[in-house]
Amino acid sequence: MDVSEVKGKKIMVVGLSKTGVSLVKFLAEAEADVTISDHKSPAELSSAIEEIEGLKVNFDLGGHTPKVMLNQELIILSPGVSPELKIFDYARQHGVKVTGELEFAAQFVQEPIIAVTGTNGKSTTCKLIETFLKESGVKVWIGGNFGTPLTEYVRRKDKADVVIIETSSFQLELTETYAPRTVVLMNIAENHLDRYRSMDEYVRAKRRIFQNTTHDTTSVLNADDNTVVDLARDPAVQRGRIFYFSRKPSLEPQIMNIGGAVAIKDQLKVRIGPEVEYYDFKNIKMRGRHAIENIMAAICTTREYGAKPEVIQKVMNEFPGLEHRLEYVRKAGGVNFFNDSKATNVHAVQRALDAFDSNIILIAGGKMANVSFVPLTEVVKRKVKTLILVGEAKEAINRDIGDFSETYLIGTFEEAVLIAYQKSRIGDTILLSPGCPSFDLFDNFEERGNYFKKLVYEFK
């Protein structure tokens, strides 16, 4: 698609978030007839409106007016806006096309796209991919769900050799032509059931990333995840080349035959081309067995794009991980504090708990997300000495796993952190790994994690 095709077209942007602001700027620059619609009032959107001040746009704020929607040729939704709202069905029935920001922006990208999706591990894997390539001299751009909307890449004049897009299920819901050159699927676990009616519906959203695969597509898949392996049998996935990665040495013969990576003792054995390569992971800084999965996925992805083996090994040894992902905060009173605020689902908490041996004081809870914490029962019994629950979901979590350790239901986040410290002993680990979104008490997981760190640094 050429930018000139946008000129004069009546296009509505729904949701004036960070993504919405980027879309509005791009469309206004392309001389489209832009209308912004948001259920929030002008006062609630004041900071976003300031960012687009001076641009020629129309507003439909404080709700979505059907008459205004029907006057559009195209409606573009920000990722946080559910396409299932009845107003969008109404627009579709009247011939108005409804799409998402990722689908719209990707049509303007000519460079090869690496798309990383999955329930957990997306951001860390994206950052590893970026670092492996960048340090090897490859010019890359990273964004999508990672933090910068793809539309920002479309707006910039300086193009990259490779575009890395962290791709969420929300972004995939409205994709039709989105066709990454490389698809990386980390894992699939129960998540976002406040948005999806069932786990099957969530999996279907993830599956959409494969709908436009060709013989030139490479898929990098987790051989240890049963749902991912089931998806790999899809004819769409089978059209292209597949690399598997696994932490199970028993899968070495199959993976070396197909291509991919497998962890054996302290080494990664990798075969992307005809030669087998070895990487040492005993000195990596990232915590948790899942860190090995992230590294393997990144190696399988980047060797095809020019990442150098010596660079990969150097980055593996030095990469500290991302903020709010099992981030070491400090030691106070002989107790280690870890910030895993990004753990917004049960699968992520499981991975965090697996990174420690025992004597964990776990701070969990947040916004209700319609998921069960029962899968954590065994690991909580073995490793969690004290469970501190806070937020909207605390009662539900207590019903699921509150009987398997000393458990406290706390009123405020500050009090939760304080009680965790009071209950700790020398050698304990205090872990913030909420297993829930942050929106009951905080604007996002970053704000929650930063506040946790602020409180921890106040301890003597």
Image: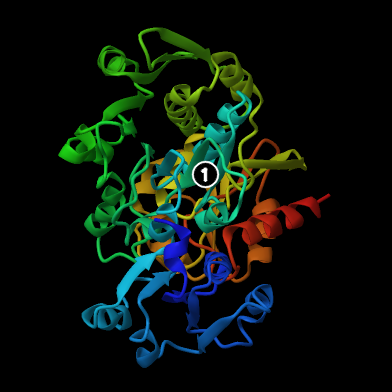
Total numbered labels: 1
Q: Is residue 368 left or right of residue 146?
A: left
Residue furthest to the right in view is 460
Q: Residue at x 24, y 54 (%)?
A: 204
Q: Percent position (x, y) of residue 114? A: 43, 39
Question: Which residue is found at the position 38% from the left and 45% from the top?
Answer: 118
The amino acid on which the numbered mark 1 sits, given as a three-letter code, is: Ser
Quadrant where the image shows the N terminus: bottom left
Q: Please say if 168 is above or below 224.
A: below
Compared with 244, 209 (above or below) is below
In the figure, 137 relative to 94: above or below? above
Is residue 356 at least partly visible in the picture? no
Q: Is residue 98 above or below residue 60?
A: above
Residue 193 coordinates in the image, percent (x, y): 33, 63
Q: Quadrant of residue 379?
A: top left
Q: Residue at x 41, y 51 (%)?
A: 346
53 or 372, which lies in front? 53
* Residue at image point 39% right, 7% down: 275
Where disc 1 sits, the SS reads helix
Please name whichever residue, 166 or 361, is drawn nearer the observer in this view of the structure.
Answer: 166
Which residue reaches farthest top?
275
Specify whether residue 136 is in view. yes
Classify 10 Å Cα crowding around label 1: few (below 14), some (14-19), many (20 and above).
many
* x then y, percent, for residue 39: 48, 84
Residue under label 1: 123
Q: Quick one: 417 or 53, which is closer to the camera?
A: 53
Q: Check the image and tell me how it is coloured.
A: rainbow
